[in-house]
Image (cartoon, rainbow, N blue to C red):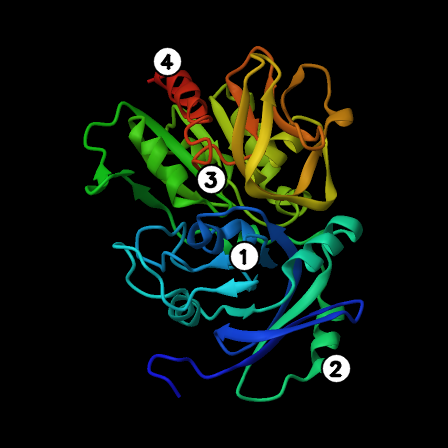
Amino acid sequence: MAENQLPFSRGGVMLADGTFFEGAGFGAVGATAGEVCFNTAMTGYQEILSDPSYAGQIVAFTFPHIGIVGTNNEDIETLNPAVRGMIVRADAEHPSNYRSLADLDRWLKAHNIPAVAGIDTRALTAMIREKGMPHGAIVNCGDGQCDKPALLKQAKEFPGLVGLDLAKDVTSRQIYRWSETPWAWNEGYGEEGKPTFRAVVLDYGVKRNILRLLAGKGADITVLPADAKLDEVLRHEPHGVLLSNGPGDPAATGEYAIPTIKGIVDKGIPTFGICLGHQMLGLALGGKTKKMAQGHHGANHPVKDLETGKVEIVSMNHGFTVDTDTLPKGVKQTHISLFDCSNCGLRLEGADVFSVQYHPEASPGPMDSHYLFDRFADAAKKRA
């Protein structure tokens, strides 16, 4: 065997309808089931794989070469990634970047995430576009044989995400403070030393960069678990509350989260929802949500601000959406996807309460959506 050449591992992806994609396994050895989705981003694979919103899902990247810049300890959104598995056309075994500390294979092993390379990701993506996101099982068999009947059974038994509360699996277990500010070139992350307002973040699976951007706007941040009650929120006397992103069915998480959100809004506290937080704000204001066929997963999504006419290029990751037809009077749709016209933003008229479906802390535009953090900070500072 040539120096540095990895031994061949068998692997594959089995869909619940019996379709099997055979490839080479890497990352952690083992099998797991989940909902299979595709992501069209060309960069940011480490941020994607560490996004808590991907709990219960297997991510197939449409960009053919993943792992080119390796991995590091800075480009992560959580310490404990919840993604079920990763599918790529080709993995880069020898990354090249001055910030790289380890190749993707080693990082995946460290986080117990199985991956498969060498399959036709175009065919898989076309299948998802036509039929919706399937249930599937991914396996890295190592140097053993892949048990296809067992994989099919595992794929068929996956319960799906409808009715599933996954926020409880990825939320923080305790209250904590946050003061780290956004990354600067060749300087790393900063520290907010003189906050100008207090913010409570309800953690349904919050991404670190949301907290960083919020701290960068002057927030003194307290992060509370997903099931925090209204009195726990009010105890910290927030000038604003941010409802974070997260995985799973918003209606399921909403069973315990919506009463708290309703109470926050009724108190007149400025409220900003992102992704799952957006969906649950929509539910709290009287709307409904629904499952999407293929969802939105990528960093090249055009979204139109209906109030300004501005088009933003945004990052998205969601499989549920707010049903605009169910929004009551006084709740206004503010943003729409230019791919399918689905809802991407709303606000409560006459109040500093608003939310977006996409991820304004990500930088595909690169900073098209950062104004939303300014809007929230300005509203909160009025109460400070």
Check if mark 3's residue and mark 1's residue have beta carbons within 8 Å: no
Q: Label 4 to label 3, Cα distance in Å?
A: 21 Å
Tell me which label, 3 or 2, sits earlier in the chain: 2
Q: Which mark is residue 149?
A: 2
Residue depicted at x 68% and y 37%: 321
Q: Which residue is mark 1?
A: 64
Residue depicted at x 46% and y 53%: 45
Q: Amino acid at mark 4?
A: Lys
Q: Which residue is mark 3?
A: 202
Q: Amino acid at mark 3?
A: Leu
Q: Label 3 to label 1, Cα distance in Å?
A: 36 Å
- Which element is circle 4 on? loop
Check if mark 4's residue and mark 2's residue have beta carbons within 8 Å: no
18 sits to left or right of 154: right
Camera-nearest label, 4 or 1: 1
Q: Which residue is mark 4?
A: 382
Picture layout, residue 114 above or below residue 96: below
Q: Amino acid at mark 2?
A: Pro
